[in-house]
Amino acid sequence: MLRILIWLITLTAVPALAAPNGTIRVVDADTIDVGGTRVRLFGIDAPEMGQPCRADGREWDCGAWTRDAVRNAFEGAFARCQARDTDRYGRVVAQCSVDGQDMGQMIVRSGLAWAYRRYSDTYDLDEKAAAIAERGLWAVEVQMPSDYRAAGVADDPAPNQNCAIKGNISSGGRIYHMPGQEHYTRTRINPANGERWFCSRAEAEAAGWRAARR
């Protein structure tokens, strides 16, 4: 009887998420590739690529600025990650450490991202320390990434007017939207998440995307 119970528990157990370990390639300030696995760092949120920063009458790309700083600190290092979840883009959401130090904590404490309190308060005190010291993002004028995304401006532009098919990745999979379809206008394209533009239906389908139903 005991053997049967153990066998049933084994069958119904939820499989553990893979914990990627490996060399880091920085995609942006909160997204990295670890040994070839795309990882969204747990508990932090950084500026989108193309999102503006302003200070002293100047404006620059805040996403690229914070990405380059994180890249200088971590590119090529070896990371050990603890997977927490997967997001709607299929990325592993994980806490990663380098030389025993939490990457998310170091990034937030350096002022290169915010604590993502929608999901966790893990880095709340680290954010407060960066704010008090006016490090990084705390020394400039910048919109919160969630507000920037909600405003619908975090959309990578189409390469040209003939390549206007949107290849979006969501919980429903890889779906392409044609101009004029119901959800075309509000669909946003973020290449950092693997999304892209297509020039034809055939190109989209050959790449593994399926057509939106409406």
Image: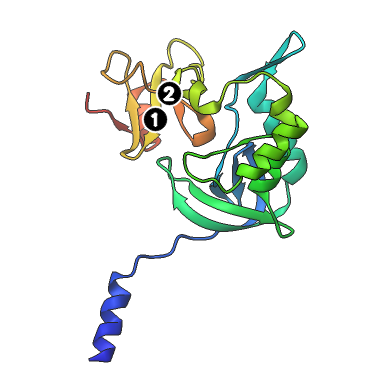
**Nearest the camera: 198 or 101?**
101
Which dot marks residue 43?
none
Asked if 134 appears above or below 78 in the picture, the reply is: above
- Residue designated by label 2: 188
Q: Earlier in the sequence, mark 1 or mark 2?
A: 1
Crowding at dot 1, Cα within 10 Å, few <14 / some 14-19 / many 20+, comes out as many
Q: Where is residue 14 in the image (x, y as percent from the top left)?
A: 35, 65
Q: Image quarter for residue 51?
A: top right
* Disc 1 target residue: 168
CA distance separating discs 1 and 2: 7 Å
**In which quarter of the view is residue 4 placed?**
bottom left
Residue for point 69% across, 31% down: 66
Q: Relative to 64, is 127 above or below?
A: below
> Would residue 203 appear left or right of 52 to someone viewing this image?
left
| Residue 191 percent coordinates (x, y) | 52, 30
Q: What element carries label 2?
A: loop
